[in-house]
Image (cartoon, rainbow, N blue to C red):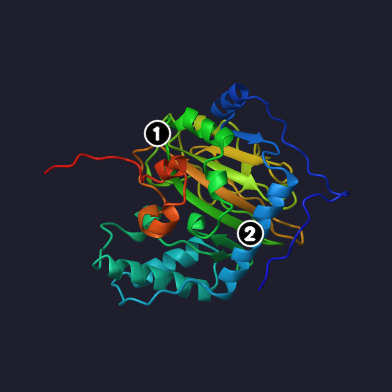
Amino acid sequence: MSIKRISTIRPDNTPKRTLMPNDHQSRLAHLMEHGYVVIPEVLNRVQTQTIRDDMDRIFSREREIPFLPEDGDTLVDDSDIESYLRSSYNISKNESDRLMQRIRHTRNHDLMTRWPCSIEAVNKTFLHLPTLFDEDRSQRIWNLLNKSDTIPALAEHTEILKLAQNILGTDCILSDCSATSIGPHTEGGSWHVDVPLGQLPDPLPDFPLTTQNVWMLDDFTESNGATRVVPKSHLLRRKPQWDSEHQPNAIPLTGPAGSVAMWLSNTWHCSGANITDFPRRAVLCYYARSWIKPFSDFQRGISLERRACFSETLRYLLGHSSKGLVRG
């Protein structure tokens, strides 16, 4: 099943822009004060179209040939895991079965490792998450750096990376790199803060642990589900209630394709409802402080041959250039 294509600009539906400061220091100040910022049109139309075509190719391929490793042995908490996945994510039975197959394979490969707590308390960095959701209308691509030649330039983009480094330190790392396609006629997501804050008790730290950076491959509009944030919610130092719906102060992060929306990990946010007939696509580059466990296992997920093609900056962001003590 292929993803429908949407043109970048429609004369009758020019996207509204979230008004934002236009220089580095002002953007940084806005990000720290309000918890989010939008940088308009970082990519031009040709660059955006090239990446969008690349993502469409991968979306289509992974729908046709989903990742199905050799299934592992049944584990004692299989039913708990499956129940959690079905209740926490809007996924089909087929996707639930595929997820269980991946989890069993991974946990058997890792010597039948058990989690020392209930499934609800497990950090999501240990879980396989859905690639198809919203009853298979929406899709996510994991391990994107191992699948696309157009994405490394986004992960190490000087203007965006500098903002992340100013917030998280110059030694910050790339924690995850993925792509999403939010399907037509889908409901919005639940309000949340980002990993690892979801596993921490309130009050949350008074400084950001991570930043999410969303590269808009389509126009982000209120009608197609642009990400919604609650300004200054990062100052509350607490998590939103998972099943909370209406946030009266929430705003959509709108902008034309090629723009980047960025928010702090402790800013309350969710995806909006896409009430249009077209998908809303994006690439997500997730940065973290150097001492936080990455969301993705880049050491095992990216081949040595591919790593050799990356720049020194990107290899450092992936943790390949870090040096530890060698004891002889």
Kind of residue at disc 1? Asp
Instruction: Tell me which numbered mark, 1 or 2, is placed earlier along the sequence.
Output: 2
Q: Residue at x 70, y 59 (%)?
A: 279
Position of residue 49 relative to residue 259, above or below, is: below
Residue furthest right as drawn: 12
Image marks 1 and 2: residues in contact by CB distance under 8 Å: no
Q: Quadrant of the N terminus?
A: bottom right
Q: Quadrant of the C terminus?
A: top left
- Residue 72, image x and y in percent? 33, 76
- Check residue 171 in the rendering and tell me which mark sits there, or answer none: 1
Instruction: State which quadrant residue 71 falls in.
Output: bottom left
Instruction: State which quadrant residue 42 falls in.
Output: top right
| Left or right, residue 283 beside residue 87 | right
Q: 158 or 78: nearer the eye? A: 158
**Residue corresponding to mark 2:** 54
Residue furthest left as drawn: 328
Callout 1 crowding tier (Cα within 10 Å): few <14, some 14–19, many ≥20: some
Kind of residue at disc 2? Asp
- Check residue 44 in the rendering and tell me which mark sits there, or answer none: none
| Left or right, residue 259 beside residue 237 | right
Helix, strand or loop at label 1? It is loop
Helix, strand or loop at label 2? It is helix
